[in-house]
Image (tube, helix red, strand yellow):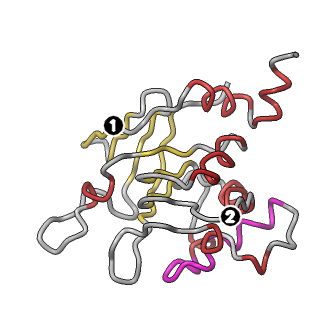
Amino acid sequence: MKATQIKGRIWVLTNLDGKLYDDVDTDMIFHNSHLHITDVEEMGQYALGNLAGWEDFANKAQPGDIILAGKNFGAGSSRQQAVDCFRALGIGAIVAESFGAIYKRNAINSGFPIVSLPGLTERLGLSLSKPGEFKTGAELEMDFETGQLSLDGTKTFQAQPFSQVQMDIFQAGNLFAYGKSLGG
């Protein structure tokens, strides 16, 4: 059984103006010029390579890191590589205010952990008058079953926990393995 609690360093995806990125589409995550790559292990080097200010993310990311993003992360096409590139890097999870519908389904079906945290934009406090709670480099603990997040061991937040089917697919490894486990 896979662990349902993880801990990792966070990367807060902000744009060049210091605001949380919303509407990061699958082409920004994994550029269409790399779609000829079929080996998942090779995809990681291109993760976020088309997102302004984050082109070198793949060189800095470490296994277990957690990405924080704004609304509608993974908007756009049904590009599976936009999930697989993070799996190749060993990214522990992605936390976003919301996800594009197709991206969300692809991630869940792949057994890749994604977590929705409503109100994340406000919690980041990305204005000059209010300091943000989440900062790149901080440590975040997550519990996929309860949705509880703990920032640097001091502040807690309530995200949406995994649904039962998301947990079942995650535990099985992916949708195909889950289907086989049902035995039908």
What kind of residue is marked 1? Answer: Gln
Local secondary structure at mark 2: loop
Q: Are marks 1 and 2 in contact (CB under 8 Å)?
A: no
| Residue drawn at 68 percent across, 71 percent down | 30
Residue matched to label 2: 77
- Is 41 in the magenta? yes
Residue at the left extreme of this rendering: 129
| Residue drawn at 81 percent across, 26 percent down | 179
Whether 82 is drawn above or below 33: the answer is above
Q: For the C terminus, give its image quadrant.
A: top right
Q: Position of residue 26 (x, y in %)?
A: 63, 67
Q: In this rendering, would 164 be left or right of 119?
A: right
Residue nearer the viewer, 39 or 169: 169
Residue nearer the viewer, 13 or 104: 104
- Residue segment shown in magenta: 40-56
Q: Position of residue 50 (x, y in %)?
A: 61, 80
- Mark number displayed over residue 158: 1
| Residue drawn at 57 percent across, 65 percent down | 61
Q: CA distance from mark 1 to mark 2?
A: 29 Å
Q: In this rendering, would 28 be left or right of 182?
A: left
Whether 149 is drawn above or below 64: the answer is above
Q: In this rendering, would 109 be left or right of 41?
A: left
Q: For the N terminus, give its image quadrant.
A: top right
Residue 165 location, quadrant: top right
Q: Position of residue 103 (x, y in %)?
A: 63, 54
